[in-house]
Amino acid sequence: MNKLLAQIAKFGVVGVIAFIIDYVIYRIFNVVFETTGFSSAFPQYYLISALLGFTVSVIANYILSFKFVFERKEDMSRKTEFVIFLVLSIIGLGINEICLFIGFDMIYLNWPWLQSIMSAGFAKDVFFKFGATGVVMVYNFISRKIFLEKK
């Protein structure tokens, strides 16, 4: 049990690092899209920002996860390992995008009282991105433990 708790703690640290990478890139592109007018042409611009942040953070997450968190399976090639990691991460991206879409387009835009509470764009970005990240983090740990870790 202590080994599992230590592993979860390490996964959390790696997750925080990957989240910082993801979130910084996400915010940078949101600002770029908002200031260039792209957001007017494509109201779901935040989904593109999320995809870009995810792409960079998944590579960092892969490297850190197998350096510090999970024991590699000896009978699995690194290519196969990365492909499985990538597929699981893409599923996580899908979950993330669904959570963001539900948060922004189905909840935030349809609940005026919530808009008044979260009047700043940054507040809604933080709230929904953190929520989506929490859901995906649980999925990531369980799926990687099942499919990628040495038993």
Image (cartoon, helix red, strand yellow):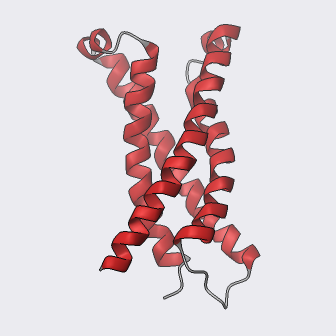
Q: Outermost residue, left direction?
A: 113
Q: Position of residue 14 (x, y in %)?
A: 53, 56
> What residue is rendered at 59% in x and 40% in y?
22
Side of 143 where 81 appears, left or right: right
In this rendered view, identify the residue nearer to me: 71 or 133.
Answer: 71
Q: Is residue 11 above or below residue 112?
A: below
> What residue is rendered at 43% in x and 71% in y?
7
Q: Is residue 86 visible?
A: no
Q: Position of residue 115 (x, y in %)?
A: 32, 13
Q: Is residue 85 above or below residue 59?
A: below
Q: Is residue 93 above or below residue 114?
A: below
Q: Position of residue 97 (x, y in %)?
A: 51, 40
In this rendered view, identify the residue nearer to me: 143 or 2.
Answer: 2
Side of 118 where 21 appears, left or right: right
Q: Is residue 83 above or below residue 71?
A: above
Q: Outermost residue, bottom direction?
A: 75
> What residue is rendered at 58% in x and 36% in y?
50
Residue 109 occupies quadrant: top left
Q: Is residue 118 visible?
A: yes
Numbered marks: total: 0
Q: Position of residue 3 (x, y in %)?
A: 38, 79
In this rendered view, identify the residue nearer to me: 59 or 136.
Answer: 59
Side of 100 where 70 appears, left or right: right
The N terminus lies in which quarter of the figure?
bottom left
Residue 60 occupies quadrant: bottom right
> What residue is rendered at 67% in x and 63% in y?
63
